[in-house]
Image: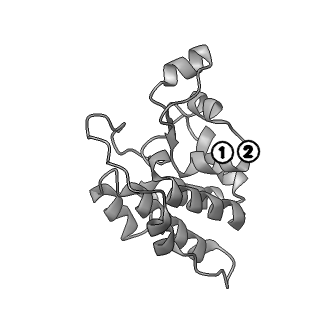
């Protein structure tokens, strides 16, 4: 297991929650222009698997938008599992909130979009403790949550990108 990579992903989500969305492989407000015209992604966000591929250097935001538009039988998440050096079973568990252990799965289906990043950080902590090497030092999840960027006004519901909570 590439603990360093998963820890970097955990830290990034903790410090940049606006770049996380569990329900989509990848999203950008201007995805069509990015893919058609080569524009820079605006308001880019992605799931845990997407962050793994970005931080591993496997895919760029643009490529992730192109390849992650819809669930295609495993392309994105299986590549992310390989990048993180975890088994396919562990990849399904980590990358699909519908496969998270209790109580995380239940919390996911009840949480707001603003709560998703903190829940993902907590699940990454749990996952690393469950599957990682023994003796892994406890990460500073609470410190991460309070040390992130200065508070910003939350996006209004009508401006926030959302999709039905499927297996992504």
Q: Is residue 38 visible?
A: yes
Q: Farthest residue toward the bottom?
A: 135
Number of other residues with Cα within 10 Å of mark 2, as a class: few under 14, some 14 to 19, many 20 or more:
few
Q: Which disc number belongs to residue 114?
A: none
Q: Quadrant of the N terminus?
A: bottom right
Q: Is residue 29 above or below residue 125?
A: above
Nearest the viewer among 35 and 110 is 35
Q: In the image, which disc is placed on residue 54?
A: 1
Q: Position of residue 147 (x, y in %)?
A: 49, 66
Local SS, label 1: helix
Do residues under tags 1 and 2 come within 8 Å of each other at their CB atoms?
A: yes
Residue at x 56%, y 31% (from the top left corner)? 65
Residue furthest to the top = 37
Q: How is the image coloured?
A: one colour
- Nearest to the observer: residue 81 or residue 146: 146
Image spot of residue 74 (x, y percent): 59, 41
Residue at horizontal 36 percent and vertical 70 percent from the top: 103
Q: Given the current orientation, which residue lies at the most extreme front position? A: 150
Tell me where residue 149 appears, x and y as whole percent.
48, 57
Q: CA distance from mark 1 to mark 2?
A: 5 Å
Local secondary structure at mark 2: loop
Residue at image coords 47%, 36%: 43
- Classify 10 Å Cα crowding around label 1: few (below 14), some (14-19), many (20 and above): some
Is residue 138 positioned above or below 67 on the image?
below
Q: Tell me the number on the disc at residue 57.
A: 2
Q: Is residue 51 above or below residue 119?
A: above
Q: Is residue 6 left or right of residue 166?
A: right
Residue 1 visible within the image: no
Q: In the rendered view, would you say 72 is above or below 90?
A: above
Is 152 on the left or on the right of 15, as rendered? left
Quarter holding residue 11: bottom right
């Amino acid at each position: 297991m590439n603990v360093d990579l998963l820890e970097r992903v955990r830290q990034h989500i903790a410090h940049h929650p606006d770049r996380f969305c569990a329900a989509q492989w990848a999203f950008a407000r201007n995805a069509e222009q990015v893919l058609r015209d080569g524009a820079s992604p605006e308001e880019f966000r992605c799931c845990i698997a997407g962050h793994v591929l970005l931080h591993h250097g496997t895919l760029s935001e643009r490529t992730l938008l192109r390849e992650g538009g819809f669930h295609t039988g495993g392309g994105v998440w299986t590549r992310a599992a390989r990048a993180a050096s975890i088994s396919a079973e562990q990849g399904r568990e980590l990358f699909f909130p519908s496969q998270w252990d209790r109580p995380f799965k239940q919390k996911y289906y009840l949480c707001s979009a603003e709560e998703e990043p903190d829940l993902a950080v907590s699940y990454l902590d749990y996952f690393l403790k469950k599957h990682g090497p023994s003796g892994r030092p406890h990460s500073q999840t609470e410190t991460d949550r309070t040390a992130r960027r200065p508070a910003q006004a939350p996006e209004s519901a009508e401006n926030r990108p959302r999709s039905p909570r499927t297996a992504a």
